[in-house]
Every structure is written in C-alpha cells, then in structure tokens.
Amino acid sequence: MDHYPENPNLNPNYTHLPECALDPFSWDFELSEYLNMLDGGADQDSKSQLQRIASSEKIMDSSSSAGSIGAISRNNDIRCKNIGVKKSKMDAGHRVAFRTQSELEVMDDGFKWRKYGKKSVKNSPNPRNYYKCSSGGCEVKKRVERDREDASYVITTYEGVHNHESPCVVYYNQTPLMVPTGWTLQANSSRSSSSS
DNA sequence: CGCTTTTGACCCGCGC
DNA sequence: GCGCGGGTCAAAAGCG
C-alpha cells in the first residue's frame, strides 16, 4: 500500500477534517455540528457533497443517535466522504456500520488494513470482504460489501476499537493540511447512475 | 524478502 | 443431527 503524500496544499477540493474525523472510533459529534463547521471554513463543493451524502441512509446496529462524519477516501477517482454512526457502548462488540456512496469499495480511513477473507453473501450478488487492522496487536476488523439494492453504495462495518492512533492522525499532527496528492474530493456527479 | 491478496477449506452458531 | 450461512484460517501466489 502506498502512503501519505506530501502536498496537501495542492488539492483545492480537500476539506480539512477535524482530527477526530480521522479516527472513526472517536467520532462523537453530531453530523449537523460538522456541517456547521464546514459552513465556517469549507468550500461550497465539499459542503454540498457532504450534505448529499448525509442524506443517504445511515446504517447502524445500535440505537445511538449520534451521527458523525467519517474519514476521507482517496484514489484517482475517489469522491466521497463517509457518514458514520458511533455506537456509544464500548464493549467487545463495538461496531459501526455505515453506507457510503462510492465507486470504490476500499476506502482509506487512515488505518492500514489487511484483507483476510472474502465471502459471497446469501442475499447479495456482491461478495463481502473482510479486513483486519494490520497494526500489530490491533484486532479491529472491517467488513466491506456493496449494497445489494444499489451497487453504487458501499456498506462498511467496523468492529472493535483501535488500540493505537491512526497513522493518518499522526501525520496530521505534523502537517495540518495533509492530503494525499491523489485525493480529489469533488461532487460525485459523474457516478454511473445505474439507477435502474 | 517481507508483506498483502487470493481462495478454498474449515469452524461455528442457528434453525429446522 | 443435519444443512446452511457467515466468519476465519492458512497456504500459495503476487508484488514492490
């Protein structure tokens, strides 16, 4: 896997995310709060994009009411942010699931993941991928699958709590405007609306 | 050479 | 007890 690029300032579309947004398991602020934050500093594109995504269905396995923003994805063609829901209970089954509109299934949330399994699921034409945090000693798992009803959505489920900081956060602490050169956060207007 | 991905096999829980 | 479905393991292959 490649890592975190050097030229944050080259990307005009990048919206600066708060530190906590880089760590899915420390999200505990309301979505609306975050939107307000964007209101204050972010460019219009990112904001509207976020709102659009925010309107997509959130999936959760707990009754937590705290909506929050997830990490940024990246790739040549990446164009989404994640919406997450924090589960307030911090037990062994600490789990967060959210649906993201993205062409890409694997989104870089700042952690390093190692794929350890792939399974086709009963009610979906799409396989489900299983990832583990590749940081030594960290047992966090992640499950990624495409929404069976709308393949333009990706359902990501995190399970567990990282026992370490995101390398992304570490980097961020050193370089406030960090963003990989390849990142382009733009309105996902060009997504191949296979809305049949 | 070390790390990641792939993929079939294996395991386990659950419903019948 | 058996079959099914979901989750994990681990060997082999691939890649930088």
Image: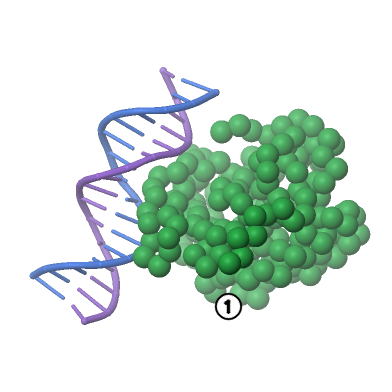
Chain colours: A green, B purple, C blue
Q: Along the horizontal axis of the image, is B4 left or right of A56? A: left
Q: Amino acid at mark 1?
A: Ser
Side of A191 where C10 appears, left or right:
left
Considering only vertical position in the picture, is A2 above or below A25?
above
Residue found 85% across the figure and 43% down from its top = A12
Residue drawn at (76%, 39%) of the image: A179
> Which residue is painted at 39% across and 48% down in the image?
A117
Asked where in the image residue C5 lies, by quadrant, the reply is bottom left
Residue A180 image offset from top left, x and y in percent: 73, 37
Q: Secondary structure at mark 1?
A: loop
The quarter in which the N terminus of chain A is drawn is top right
- Residue at mark 1: A63
Nearer the observer, A26 or A123 = A123
Q: Which residue is nearer to you in this view: A170 or C16?
A: C16
Q: Is residue A97 visible?
A: no
Residue A13: x and y in percent read 82, 46
Where does residue A83 sit, x and y in percent of width and height?
A: 67, 62
Residue A45 percent coordinates (x, y): 84, 55
